[in-house]
Image (cartoon, grey):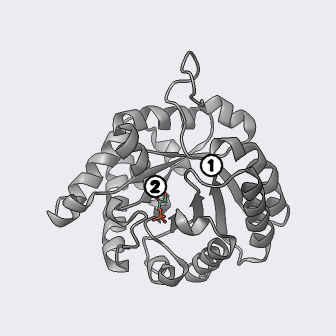
Amino acid sequence: MRTILAGNWKMNKDATEARALLTAVMGRSCKAPTGVEVVVAPPFPYLAMAVELAAVARDCGVVAKVAAQNCHHKENGAYTGEVSVPMLRSLGVDACLVAHSERRQYFGETYALAADKIHLLLQYGMEPILCCGEGQEERENGSFNAVVERQLRGALATVDRKDYARLVVAYEPVWAIGTGLTATPQQAQDMHAHIRGTLVRIGGEAAREVPVLYGGSCKPDNAEGLFNMPDINGGLIGGASLEADQFLALITAAGRAKQP
Ligand code: 13P
């Protein structure tokens, strides 16, 4: 099973800061424990820079990948201001977040739209990182398992079984994102086991190997408990991915937790 530590920068950093952070993360990840895939998801203007700097980590044997935070669901055309999957692919971008809760919350994105994006990403040989997760009310009223299952079914209905090898799922409970509240390791483990079971019901046995990442106020001081859980295969990190020291500490924590 792959272990992945991904940093979602969201809408942060200017170009100088972006270069400094990418240089530090890619350079220093060479010294981090091996076996962890390092993914950075900076804003669109820095993707080419990230592809160039990820080569530094690749040269020293780290599996380093670059992800976009979003893409359009159509291949090309008159969609002013949008960025297409073929554009990302042609830059050397490896992966793309899909259905992040902030896209759902602020831009009205649905899982039907996510299905279209995933289809295109797979067609272009990229890895979709599909985000799912319940809101606060759904956590409190106990509907969270059903909600997440519906999200996954909506996004994955048309995915070919052979393509599960290129899928990554991130569980990000909305109530834990940027709030300082984290799911307990047991809450996260229970949901990750549910997600894995759901993936296998939708996609068959091949889907058992889909890495399922945890996201939501994951920091160096709470990561170990989460990463030690059997169905948690790494993290999708927001705030703590903006500081090289913290992001590197999380790579190390993921590597330590997943050592055989
Ligand atoms: P935080 O780590 O800032 O809570 O963000 C999580 C997230 O949304 C990553 O995609």
* Residue 82 appears anywhere in the view: yes
- 24 on left or right of 99: right
Q: Residues within 10 Å of mark 1 (few under 14, many from 20)?
A: many
Indicate the quadrant containing the N terminus: top left, top right, bottom left or bottom right. bottom right
- Nearer the viewer's eye, disc 1 or disc 2? 1
Question: Residue 9 occupies which quadrant of the picture?
Answer: bottom right
Q: Secondary structure at mark 2?
A: strand
- Residue at 36 percent across and 71 percent down: it is 188
Residue 36 in picture, x, y percent from top left: 65, 69
Foreground of the two, 229 or 31? 31
Q: Secondary structure at mark 1?
A: strand
Amino acid type, residue under disc 2 in the picture: Val
Residue 96 in picture, x, y percent from top left: 57, 45
Sooner in the amino-acid sequence: mark 1 or mark 2:
1
Q: Are marks 1 and 2 in contact (CB under 8 Å)?
A: no
Foreground of the two, 226 or 218? 218
Q: Gap in Å between the C-alphas at discs 1 and 2? A: 14 Å
* Residue 156 appears anywhere in the view: no
Question: Can you name the residue that lies furthest to the left here?
Answer: 141
Residue 166 in picture, x, y percent from top left: 56, 48
- Residue at 60 percent across and 31 percent down: it is 83
Residue 223 in picture, x, y percent from top left: 50, 79
Name above or below for residue 94 compared with residue 184.
above
Indicate the quadrant containing the C terminus: top left, top right, bottom left or bottom right. bottom right
- Residue at 69 percent across and 70 percent down: it is 244
Name above or below for residue 218 compared with residue 236.
below
How many numbered circles does the render carry? 2
Amino acid type, residue under disc 1 in the picture: Ala
Q: Which mark is residue 169?
A: 2
Q: Which mark is residue 67?
A: 1
Q: Which mark is residue 185?
A: none
